[in-house]
Amino acid sequence: MALTRADIELFLKTLKEISTYDLSDYSENSLKRRIEKLLLDNNTNLQGLIYKISSNKQFVEKIVRDITVNTTELFRDVKTWHKIRYRILPKLAHLEKINILHAGCSSGQEVFSMLILLNELNLFDKTNVYATDLNSEMIEKSKKGLYKFRFNLNYLDNYDKVIKENPFNFDEIRDVPYENYFHIDKDLDIIKMKDFLIKKPTYAVSDLVKNENKFYKKYDLILCRNVLIYFNNDLQNRVLINFHSLLNDNGFIVVGVHERILGEAEEKFIKKSTFYIKK
Ligand SMILES: C[S@@+](CC[C@H](N)C(=O)[O-])C[C@H]1O[C@@H](n2cnc3c(N)ncnc32)[C@H](O)[C@@H]1O
């Protein structure tokens, strides 16, 4: 069923009235695709969907989860992690304390990537790592640090490229066994993060639409990757201007490889490929 703009507006208005979720400033194309898929998956039409969200709170949570994509991986976009390793974290190393925020952390693989890297660079103890997501189920998954193995073999490949290999000297291989950071059980088909990593981050459910600062902190580095892409330009700008106010001087923002800071927020940051520095 092809939805019109009026259909989408009606769905969003109902969702806003009956829940705390306001998706009105999400990108229209992505919303349209997602809601159309929901209608197919639930074998219903728009009226049916609206009736169901109005009468079933659990269904609302499920629908919002289905609309907000959760795809992620360990050391996703290896080149970005090279930048974090060689160009961002060394610039923060002199600080007495480092505060890092992962906004839209999904099931936590991005957070564990950071924790592993911090440990490799001897910055683990002096860094506070905070992470948020709209979706409470994703936060609970992050807290467990437990992932499927066979489905995620690329995690090991990414780890090798960021942790074991040196992109500036391919002859150099660092001997950093996976067991330093996670346990792989092939029979149970799991990857389990080590306890010292699991215990480190502070998590909160938080909605970027609401410009919250759940931890009452200022940050030296904010990662908000593959989240802005689902927002329209207005919301992207509001979120980025809020991040600007949450950053310490010369703080960094890392966005996804397909994301850019544009519009009003652009002049507040110096662009360095996929990362930005607060002006
Ligand atoms: C595609 S995942 C990205 C995960 C990770 N940052 C990465 O790049 O691999 C997008 C995440 O953003 C979250 N999200 C979507 N809208 C949000 C909002 N308004 N506030 C906070 N998180 C949101 C989703 O729940 C999802 O977990």
Image (spheres, helix red, strand yellow):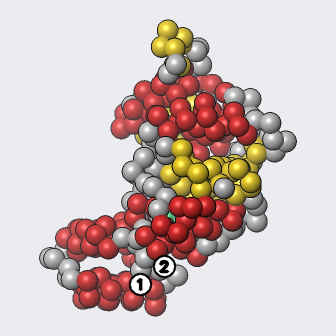
Q: Is residue 116 visible?
A: no
Residue at screen point 67% across, 27% down:
120
Q: Is residue 2 visible?
A: yes
Amino acid found under the numbered disc labelled 1: Leu
Instruction: Give the numbered dot on residue 15.
Output: 1
> Going by the image, does 258 lie left or right of 47?
right
Q: Quadrant of residue 205?
A: bottom right
Residue at screen point 39% across, 36% down:
152
- The mark tally for this picture is 2
> Going by the image, does 251 lie left or right of 76?
right
Tag 2 near tag 1, CB within 8 Å: yes
Q: Position of residue 94 (x, y in %)?
A: 80, 36
The answer to which of 179 and 202 lies nearer the viewer is 202
- Marks 2 and 1 sit apart, C-alpha to C-alpha, by 7 Å
Residue at the left extreme? 1
Q: Does 79 appear above or below 34? A: above
Residue at screen point 41% across, 84% down:
15
Respond yes or no on whether mark 2 lies under 8 Å from ligand 1: no
Q: Does 78 appear above or below 278? A: above
Neighbour tally class for label 1: few under 14, some 14-19, many 20 plus, Cα within 10 Å: many
What residue would you read off at disc 2? 21
Residue at screen point 16% across, 77% down:
2
Residue at the front extreme? 267
Q: Position of residue 29 (x, y in %)?
A: 28, 69
Q: Position of residue 107 (x, y in %)?
A: 51, 51
Q: Quadrant of residue 123?
A: top right
Q: Position of residue 237 (x, y in %)?
A: 51, 69
Amino acid found under the numbered disc labelled 2: Tyr
Q: Does 256 appear above or below 152? A: below
Q: Quadrant of residue 198?
A: top right
The answer to which of 228 and 71 lies nearer the viewer is 228
